[in-house]
Image (cartoon, coloured by chain):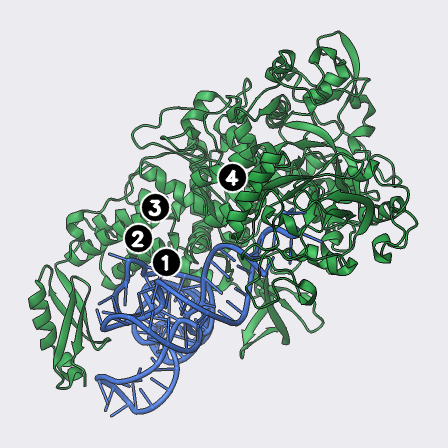
Chain colours: A green, B blue
Amino acid sequence: MATDTLPTPAEEDVPPQRYSGLLAGEIEARWQARWAADGTFVVPRTTDAGPGGKFFLMDMFPYPSDAGLHVGHPLGYIATDVYGRYLRMTGHTVLHTLGYDAYGLPAEQYAIATGTHPRVTTEANIARYRRQIGRLGLAHDPTRSVATTDESFYRWTQWIFLQIYGSWYDETQGRARPIRDLIAGYEAGELTTPDGRRWSELSSVERAAALDARRLAYRSKVPVNWCPGLGTVLANEEVTAEGRSEIGNFPVLRRELTQWMMRITAYADRLLADLDRLDWPESVKTMQRNWIGRSEGVQILFPVEGQEPLEVFTTRPDTLFGATYVVVAPEHPLLDRAVPEAWPDADLPERWRAGEASPRRAVEAYRARVAAMSERDRQAATGDRTGVFSGLYATNPATGERIAVFVADYVLAGYGTGAIMAVPAHDQRDFELARALDLPIRPVVAAGDGRDPRDASSWADAYPGAGELICSANGHVSLDGLGVDEAKRRIVTWLEGEGLGAARVTYKLRDWLFSRQRYWGEPFPIVYDDEGVAHPVPETMLPVTLPDVDDYRPRATDLDAEPQPPLSRAEEWVQVTLDLGDGSRRYRRETNTMPQWAGSCWYELRYLDPDNEERFVDPEIERFWMGPRDGDDTGGVDLYVGGVEHAVLHLLYSRFWHKVLFDLGQLSSEEPFRRLFNQGYIQAYAYTDRRGVHVRADEVVERDGGFWYHDEPVERHYGKMGKSLKNGVSPDEMCDLYGADTLRLYEMAMGPLDVSRPWETRAVVGSHRFLQRVWRNLLDEHTGVPTVVDEPPDAETDRLLHATIAAVRTEMEHLRFNTAIARLIELNNHLTAQAAPVARAVAEPLVAMLAPFAPHAAEELWSRLGHHRGLAFEPFPVADPAKLVATTVTYPVQVAGKVRGSLEVPAGSDEQSVRDAALALPKVRRALAGRAVAKVVVVQGRIVSVVPAAG
RNA sequence: GCCCGGGUGGCGGAAUCGGUAGACGCGGAGGUCUCAAACACCUCUGGCCGCAAGGUCGUGCGGGUUCGACUCCCGCCCUGGGCACCA
């Protein structure tokens, strides 16, 4: 817009000391400089908080993107800052800082596109974030702001990796232990090696393998999303629905590759159980519970002709008599060795054979087809059930029947045992395959929904519900007539007695794929010897620094080649001569890097002790800030605020690392985050013209019930704020226009913290006007001199002040900043309406209460009111209980449930006098219209309800 | 499909041990100031009927409990999010 070409309006019209955006900007710069110079918010490296206690306050740290901030980003940061400032004013020692999650893909992709080193991009982005966030006046400790890309930080990320690598999970003790205990256990014969041989009989390579089999960080061949075009594996969310890479649109295949894994599944039960001890939103706990996916079932052995018995997992052992076939996952190892060369029977149904000449060919074709599909495709294809006969037969251990073993993609290799007993009558998926391949369906639970309980031929779907067991007896056990739960118990008892099965708990949670074929991440502190055995890099040699390379691109190779991470081409770095205790030898470094989650798994700990060069965190300091408080407390950060998008991954991974470190005696706290709060998001309207192209949202006007862009009608929708929708608003713009204090106040006033809401730039002026009015009530707008008087306030104002203090304190404690602000506005509106000089005894508490929200303006007012010490550590006002007691009470009076009048009586009036006064009200008498009074309800201090007689 | 949230004026929201629905803010209308505009300030602002006094309807929909229901109970509808072949 072209305002800058118009004559400047007469500035002298505006009083020089009016609280304008310009003045706010000047004040803010001044106070920020003073806080920085005085080190106001630097937290001493203390382990003594004094009588007020300590508080460790944290935000989820940002990834510094090149797009910079929009006004939605700092919502949580402002909220924690407001709360932190309140806590300081109520005597707490507050630890609050902000670091940067600086490894990540965008910087790497920018490097691929432009050749700029990711470190250059990242550092520039961090600097920009610091400047933008700094303008908001957040009371962070600047000396504790870390970045995950700092050598002094990732050195300890690598160190923690080595701790995990150097540990195993002792199931009997339910905790991680150092690997040397495992070696001792193997040596002493207390623990059996994977293949059962004695430790002393194993070669060095075999010993390494025996240890790797139980390490918490281990290498394994796992199916991954392999993208040959990009030369890397991809995360599921980087693969499109069409099974191609989001970037470049290359085909993505499922492929088994050797990758680093973290044995998070060892912690499944503790990660689940300890959720109950955390003060987290119930929704996040539920998501984690679902993700961990504990289910109790039974593992049952099905004998297979000519083979080892097949183990299946089921949660419905009660339906064992209805198992008419068995299904194994396409990846099941049984298929690698046991599939026969020829069909066992000449007259097999055509559909079982999939048109192939032999089971081996049928299974191979099926496996190849499944392997070519992405996980997504595989799950999308639920409509058409497919499967082939393996040529093998098993025996149902309950009925003794010979039943066929099928291969079908709906059975997943990674869950349970990768094999199921199919009960088509009572499982929908089994039912569908049975219908598709014409397999027998035998009901064993009587359906109570009207269908024929004994003949499934007319059923439209499976019956998964409860009911009475039928057709479920052999010579040794009978379930007939039992309910599902009782039948489960009885069959399990029988199976266990026969040695055919055992109760087992299974989890959906999988081990964590921890390596990436990328450049911009933490190198693994691992080297390999000539035999391919992995060795940890000694702690004293950390960090293993990330070398420079000239090409950040993962190498595009042919389909079958192993991926070549960018680091593999840094030959001088890869080849290393080390003395690991047996003399100098040549080793090759691990060339994968860690995933972006690594740094965020432990950054809260580094905030505590960022300069420590001896340890990742000093134990005393960790105990002080994060240690458990009482019997069942887990310890952890006192309040962690961030978006709900991290409900599962980040918050599960960091819990896992924390627990490992706790088990190893490195930490006193059992959980990283004692209390979690999810803030909502700020979203924004976006507008498209009739071509569907986004137009600049800040140039759209609302008129005649529609939206217009340069006199063209446009359509409005709602979405994320950002460049692509042309609806971004930066905090800088708001600071320029109104000042940071206004922006802070607006973001806190627009709604409860946990609720998402639309941004509305034109509404920001409301918060600005409020500050302007406070300013005008306390200072002369022309001279800037305080106008407050030392006389005491009138009784009404005094009561309102104390009621406000009490209310604001309550709201602040509960993070309800929007209603706290509303109370402050009400108090100030009252002062405005009085149109008289404000008493100092009101002005000062008002300024102090404003300080958490608008710290710069509050400091400025505080100082102009004659205080030389800053406001940051001034005590928050305390309400005088004597002044909270009202002298009169106003009762609304209802007649027949409708409010007809109101009644003011002295506080403490007895019920009888309230009732009499209410009935005497003319409006009440009129509403009664001559009817008799059946009953009068008087709720002390609340309401009077008059019930007229019927008729 | 399963599991969590959430539906209140034109808009963001307030009020839930059941007790005057719409605090506070935006927007809107009118006014003051100004040559004028912007800023600022003042008044009004849920719908309908009414000159007014007042009446009446009203918290997604339909029932219920109660002197009294946004709040509790039953049955729906809509919507945001998470998970999704987990045997």
N-term-proximal mark, 4 vs 2? 4
Q: Which mark is residue A272?
A: 4
Front position among marks 4 and 1: 4
- Residue A391, position as x, y percentages in the image: 83, 45
Hey, which quadrant is residue A105 in on the image?
A: top right
Q: Chain of mark 2?
A: A
Q: Quadrant of the C terminus of chain A?
A: bottom left
The image shows residue A529, relative to residue A769, as above or below, that is above
Q: CA distance from mark 2 to mark 3?
A: 30 Å
Front position among marks 1 and 3: 3
Give the camera-side residue of A800 and A652: A652
Label 4 and label 2 in one chain: yes
Location of mark 3 (residue): A813
Label 1 and label 3 in one chain: yes
Q: Check if mark 1's residue and mark 3's residue have beta carbons within 8 Å.
A: no
- Residue A466, position as x, y percentages in the image: 54, 56
Location of mark 1 (residue): A770
Front position among marks 2 and 1: 1
